[in-house]
Image (spheres, helix red, strand yellow):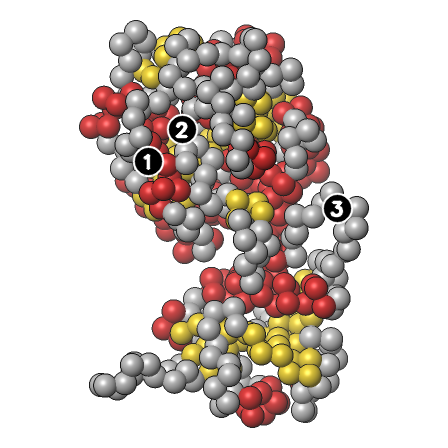
Amino acid sequence: MNIKLQSLPAADLATPLLTVFAIDTSTAPAAGIKDAPATPTLLTTNAALLAAAAPWLTTGEFKATLGETLLLHSPSGLKAERLLIIGLGKAKSLTPHEVRKGAGVAVRFAKPRTLRDLALTFPEHPSLPAELTTRALAEGALIADFDIDFYRSDRKDQSITTTTLLHPAPTPEVQRALDEGVILAESQNFARTLVNEPGNVLTPTELGHRTAAMAAEFGLQCDVHSIDKILELKMGAFAAVTQGSSEPPALIVMRYEPATPPPAGSPVLGLVGKGITFDTGGISIKPADNMDKMKYDMAGSAAMIGAMRAIAQLKPNVRVLCVVCSCENMPDGRAFKPGDVVTAMSGKTIEIMNTDAEGRLVLADGLHYAQTLGATHLINAATLTGAIGVALGLINAGLFSNDDATTQQFTDALALSGEKFWRMPCTDDYRDQIKSQIADIMNTGGSRYAGATTAAMFLKEFVGETPLVPWIHLDIAGTAWIDDNKPWQSKGPSGVAVRSITEWVRSYAR
């Protein structure tokens, strides 16, 4: 999709589909009245748009709820063939993040109607800063253009060709915001494409190939290693997980170096991703129901790869390295077993209680390796536990950390990314649940209680404490896959965390 800025008045643009956003400006109901009637109000000062929509905004059939649409054919006074009014919800809740969804609604509306070009009228409201709103519009449009039907033989290409953003006074800053939105959304879609691939296509080796090709395209350093390097580094936890598969593992290392070297003592940010390209659970095999979705168990690595793609183009003045530990978790005669004891790269011994708790094993070695490569601050992402979905549902992803200041820096970035993360406890009083009688730690907490936190406590064992290495763990298991189509986004991989990780990285360069 090509997204372009244009300052032409909305009434003068000939387009198959012109969109304008609306909010409900109704106030609290009076005493004794249950609900105040909705008051749809267009977010534009354009007289022609206001006149074309006016007869239809007082009928009561359109309430401007988030994602609601009202289509007008041959609108009076406009050159557009159609005018689509898109609701963004209550005025008090309006932010650029609702605008992002609104842009997605426009694209998802156009695609099945074989409309290949559309225009978005820039929403005018005091709560919508020009640059962040522009970025959100670009992100929403591009994210909405993604569909999962890659392998259908009867697939019809419904991609949008051009989206025109009608801005009343485009400035260089607004153009830069648009460009940033395109980079972030395309990087998120790159991650979604990786997650959507079936396990027989996206093996660890293929993930390495695609990552290396992306790195070469955007000027990142990239090395892809396999089992010999893993054994040489004494990554016993990672090696244990991969030993049951006939597919070789991939240890992927990327580096971003800014054009201007940062000052001495500046942080080196380490991004670590879980890359299990298919997870059967191993000997502790999963139920058959929904096992097909276990191709998404590399969504954490996809988020990191997508973030590195964005970082390479946005060029923040901070050093970044990325470690992806990728393999399959399969049950054959060589597979690791419950009761085994393995030794991680750090030297810590781990009693295997459940082979389906494999993601934390590969991350343990990945986190330690990132520190040996020079990382001073760490962030990892993983579809780590079903327990996080039980705790937070399918709306917020889990955030765990050993450092309040680093957590605050990440949560501040959410105001820009628009993604939802909720901090969970990760305190030492949970450590007893992973103590082992025969090794240093167990790879599960031994009960169904606090499963997401005990997984985080396991990872915390592999993060330096003297001195403290600030660390964030993102458990995205509940949000990395969307089960149902939304008005602004297709079902399938969400690409969650790409935008947030990128903004967290950029925050160290400001």
* Residue that appears at 60% across and 16% down: 245
Q: In the picture provided, is 158 more to the left or to the right than 383?
A: right
Report, in whole angstroms, how far the alpha carbon at label 1 lies from the one at label 3.
42 Å
Provide the secondary structure element on which disc 1 rests.
strand
Marks 1 and 2, the one that precedes in the sequence = 2
* Residue that appears at 47% across and 79% down: 63
* Residue 376 image label: 2
Q: In the picture provided, is 108 more to the left or to the right than 459?
A: right
The kind of residue on which mark 1 rests is: Ser
Between marks 1 and 2 in the image, the one whose residue lies nearer the viewer: 1
Disc 3 crowd, CA 10 A, few/some/many (<14, 14-19, 20+): few
Residue 272 at what x, y percent from top left? 48, 30
Query: Which residue position holds label 1?
Result: 401
**Residue sticking out furthest to the front:** 288
Between marks 3 and 2 in the image, the one whose residue lies nearer the viewer: 3
Marks 3 and 2, the one that precedes in the sequence = 3
* Residue that appears at 47% across and 35% down: 383
Provide the secondary structure element on which disc 3 rests.
loop
Report, in whole angstroms, how far the alpha carbon at label 1 lies from the one at label 2.
14 Å
Q: Contact (CB < 8 A) between labels 1 and 3?
A: no
Q: Contact (CB < 8 A) between labels 1 and 2?
A: no
Query: Which residue position holds label 3?
Result: 152
Residue 260 at what x, y percent from top left? 55, 38
